[in-house]
Amino acid sequence: MSEVVKKFLYVNRKAPYGTIYALEALEVVLIGAAFDQDVSMAFLDDGVFQLVKDQNTKEIGVKNFSPTFRALGDYEVTKLYVEAESLAERGLTEDDLQEIVYEDEDDDWAEKPSIRIVSRDEMAAVMADQDVILSF
Amino acid sequence: MSTLHTVNKSPFSTQTLLSCLSHAQDGDAVLMIEDGVYGAAKGTGVADAVAAKAGKVSIYVLQGDMAARGIDAARLIDGISAVDYAGFVRLAAEHDRAQAWL
């Protein structure tokens, strides 16, 4: 194993079911989590729709993958950046998103929120801070 | 003579919904399906444009696609009705033609 840890950002800009991008991004994140890198996810533009709570796909006959986001903490993917402006343009607030938490091993396994609402400027800074950016 | 228009793209990622609305004639119907259903919610950047057209054309949204995306009926713009798959078929039969805005 390489001891070099790189910062990876997975950028999500697509709504969850109209295309396969959102599901594929989540699959890649879960696979990539095995490589012990510093992983973050960004949700902006229509990507914020992926995190909306109470999704029920029974009638459209495809898998509801939104509960999988709640498992990311177990894979040490604990930084989910969500752009405030993208939410507002879509009539959404943080309360419309599902709750996603992780257990912080450096803080006696305290439960902490994974979702971090950031401004567009802050999102730009997150992006500029990465080694590798993968877009979906 | 009237047309059923279907819109399947998010109004925040393409101009499809706005183009459809500006081409639909009075008496036509617009049905939002797939990612098009995001155009039916209140409080968004496109809600005013949709509401302004709602009196002239009938606007519908497909229930199953709404539910998949976590949109509750309470969040629909006033004047928009949810329909199920049978309703989709009925709309297709009631109008003279269907135009899919892809």
Image (cartoon, coloured by chain):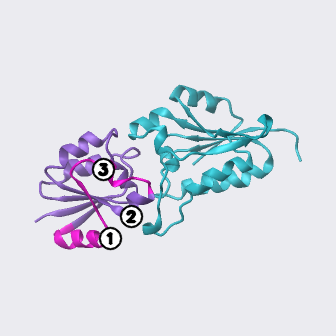
| Amino acid type for the residue under numbered disc 2 | Gly
| Front position in the image: A102 or B12 | A102
Is residue A92 found left or right of A100 in the rendered image? Answer: left
| Amino acid type for the residue under numbered disc 3 | Leu
Quadrant of the rendered structure where residue B87 is?
A: bottom left
Q: Residue drawn at (36%, 57%), measured in percent from left and top? A: B8
Q: Residue drawn at (24%, 42%), measured in percent from left and top? A: B49
Is residue B97 found left or right of B34 in the rendered image? Answer: left
Name the element at disc 1. Answer: helix
Above-or-below relation of B25 to A90: below
In the rendered image of the structure, the colour used to display chain A is cyan
- Residue B4 on image: x %, y %: 22, 63
User: Separation of disc 1 and disc 2 at Cα?
Assistant: 8 Å
Name the element at disc 2. Answer: helix
Q: Which residue is mark 2?
A: B64
Chain represented in purple: B
Say whether residue A45 is visible. Answer: no
Q: Quadrant of the C terminus of chain B?
A: bottom left
Start-end of magenta stretch: B69-97
Above-or-below relation of A9 to B35: above
Q: Are marks 2 and 3 on the same chain?
A: yes
Say whether residue A119 is visible. Answer: yes
| Front position in the image: A94 or B48 | A94
Q: Which residue is mark 1?
A: B85
Q: Is residue A24 magenta?
A: no
